[in-house]
Image (tube, rainbow, N blue to C red):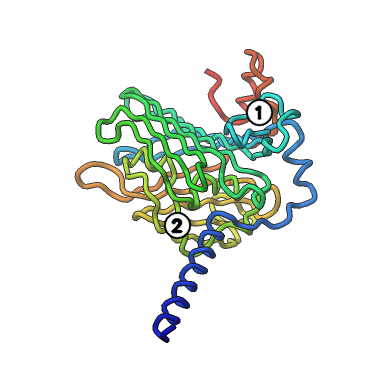
Amino acid sequence: MSPISVQVIITMKKSIYFLIAVFTFVCKPSLSQPPKDFNAYWYAGDAEITSYELEQVRYGEIHNGNAVLIFVTEPFSKSKQVKLDNWRNGGEDNVSVLKLNMTKKFLTGIYPYSMMMSTFTPVSYNQHPQILKVTTSSQEWCGHTWMQLNPENENYRLKGFSYFESEGDVNEQITCTMVEDELWTRIRLSPSDLPTGEVQMLPSTFYLRLSHRENKVREAITKLSSISASEYAEQPHQLYEIAYDNRSLKIYFEETFPHVILGWEETYTSGFGNANKMTTKAKRINMIKSSYWTKNSNTDRKIRQRLGLSTD
């Protein structure tokens, strides 16, 4: 074999090793050991519900509203990618996930927006490296849109439905990558294991729908830091930052377990014509632990008052 052929083989091997390393980092992150009180907090039979004052950017203006983050663990079917009805019979198909339901409600002029994003992140990320599902919907008086992301053969299947002709019905494959929507749950599971530096990332599904951007992976710059104080907390806490597409997201959260999210800021260009960069802000109002699915009578509406939410 000639020296040139040997050199080509060596170069090819190095490239393959590099790609394997990148794939491993993106799709198979390692998690630190959970704290001793992890199970006591997340498997107590209730959910963590946190309300936020919301200043949402839309149409080149700031619109007041509220956001709610609901975190809860539940048994999940890896094969069917839905919540298990009978987890005791789930066997190896039963994967414990930390689910996040994020809601946003705000008015734009005469008509309301109601948005919801759900993510299902395996608690044992080493065993199940891919997020198991993301669903997002947005309703307002013009119509509604819906998206769903599911693992499929080491990649993701993205389906989307919209009343806009340019978006239409989408059914496409996304290369295995970091998904921005899973970062909220990963903060709660193990913030020290968050990716930092340059990261291939599928953008927030809220952002994709509100900005009508293409569903493609971006090169994001991410950073994790500790700060002494901010408008979100007077005591030391942590900040996770993401930047791409001339957009930035900052998530503020407690540095100690259970790493409650204190608030966030999202900055990007909004408006028509002379559009400007504007910032959406969410600041915590209150947090409760509750088995909310059992609180469905009229008398239970008073619980919403503790969260600073409307009872109408």
Q: Nearer the viewer, residue 24 or 195?
A: 24
Q: Nearer the viewer, residue 120 or 189?
A: 120
Residue at 37% across / 48% down in the picture? 216
* Residue positioned most to the top: 298
Q: CA distance from mark 1 to mark 2?
A: 31 Å
Find residue 211 and report its horizontal and vertical position in percent.
33, 42
Residue at 29% across / 35% down in the picture? 167
* Element type at mark 1: loop
Q: Nearer the viewer, residue 259 or 213?
A: 213
Find residue 188 and report its horizontal and vertical position in percent.
63, 47
Residue at 40% across / 26% down in the picture? 139
Q: Is 199 above or below relative to 70? A: below
Find residue 87 and report its horizontal and vertical position in percent.
72, 29
Residue bearing the label numbered 1: 84
* Residue positioned most to the front: 1
Q: Say which amino acid is labelled 2.
A: Gln
Residue bearing the label numbered 2: 200
Q: Residues within 10 Å of mark 1 (few under 14, many from 20)?
A: some
Residue 74, picture quadrant: top right
Q: Say which amino acid is labelled 1.
A: Leu
* Element type at mark 2: strand
Q: Is 258 above or below relative to 58? A: below
